[in-house]
Amino acid sequence: MGWGPWRKKDGPVANEPIEPKESLALRLVAERLGGLGGAAWEVAGDRVRGPRRVAVVLGHDHEGSEGHVDLTFVLDTDRPEQTSLPDCVSGFGPTPEAKLERAVQMWATTTGAAVLEMLGQRGRHGAHFPAQDPDGFPGRHAIQGGIVGWGAGPEHSSVQRWAADRALLPLIAPALTADGLPRQEPIGVKLFFGTFHGKDTAEVRVNGCTSEAASAALLTADWPRPPSGGSYARTYAVLVHPSWPFAPLPV
């Protein structure tokens, strides 16, 4: 994933042309986040501005597909390199617009929900796991967003149901702690896994970068492998270091 150069301050946004797909993606992000949290989220150039210095920045589409979108949650636009949580997602549907809408919906339900819960701390959008919780992540307070699923065939929801009943973070925590987490600021972890026509896929991304070790650990988990069709699940968690200071925001 990639995105353009950051401005040092969140000042006026350059009046650069926005493609129709990008414009729709930003509008959908603003609508979804506003619907989840109730705070004002406004489209401004290549980003959606939220409360205080929080923003979601639209990144360069590295795939070029109709339903793919790169979105980076920035917790503090004055310190983007330290507080960015990049992610990407692909949607499906009968039209380009439907694909993009589905992609943003999945992102908002997983990534957006986890970040809004971290910012608001109200227990409305995600599950909290303190650092000592055996279902969480050692040494970090973890906030996990929703779990979305999709697939085909009679068992299309089986992986999502399995994931909803499992503590997923302990499956990958040993691999991530062995690799060493990249920073003390909040870290975003995406989990995507499932099976389609006998082919298994497991991907764990840490701040947008694939962790081969964690992905391999997730691949060994005993999620259902439907003999026909397919089933996938996706979720997202934010890992917060005990030293990270933040006050609840109106989101």
Image (tube, rainbow, N blue to C red):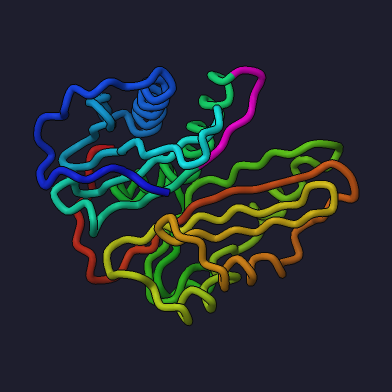
Foreground residue, 37 or 10? 10
How far from the left and from the top, in percent, is residue 67?
55, 30
How far from the left and from the top, in percent, is residue 53?
17, 42
Find residue 130 and report its image quarter: bottom left
User: Residue sitting at 66 percent across and 42 percent down?
Assistant: 149
How far from the left and from the top, in percent, is residue 23?
36, 21
112 left or right, relative to 186: right
Foreground residue, 233 or 64? 64
Q: Report the label total.
A: 0
User: Residue sitting at 76 percent across and 51 percent down?
Assistant: 195
Q: As displayed, is residue 111 above or below residue 19? A: below
Q: As displayed, is residue 65 above or below residue 130? A: above
User: Residue sitting at 52 percent across and 67 percent down?
Assistant: 211
- Residue range of the region highlighted in magenta in the rendering: 89-95
Outermost residue, bottom direction?
Answer: 178
Foreground residue, 173 or 39? 173
User: Residue sitting at 72 percent across and 70 percent down?
Assistant: 220
67 left or right, relative to 245: right
Magenta span has 140?
A: no
> Principal SS element in the magenta part?
loop
Outermost residue, right direction?
Answer: 227
30 left or right, relative to 107: left
Q: As displayed, is residue 8 above or below residue 220? A: above
Find residue 251 and report its image quarter: top left
Magenta span has 90?
A: yes
Q: As displayed, is residue 66 above or below residue 242? A: above
How far from the left and from the top, in percent, is residue 207?
40, 58
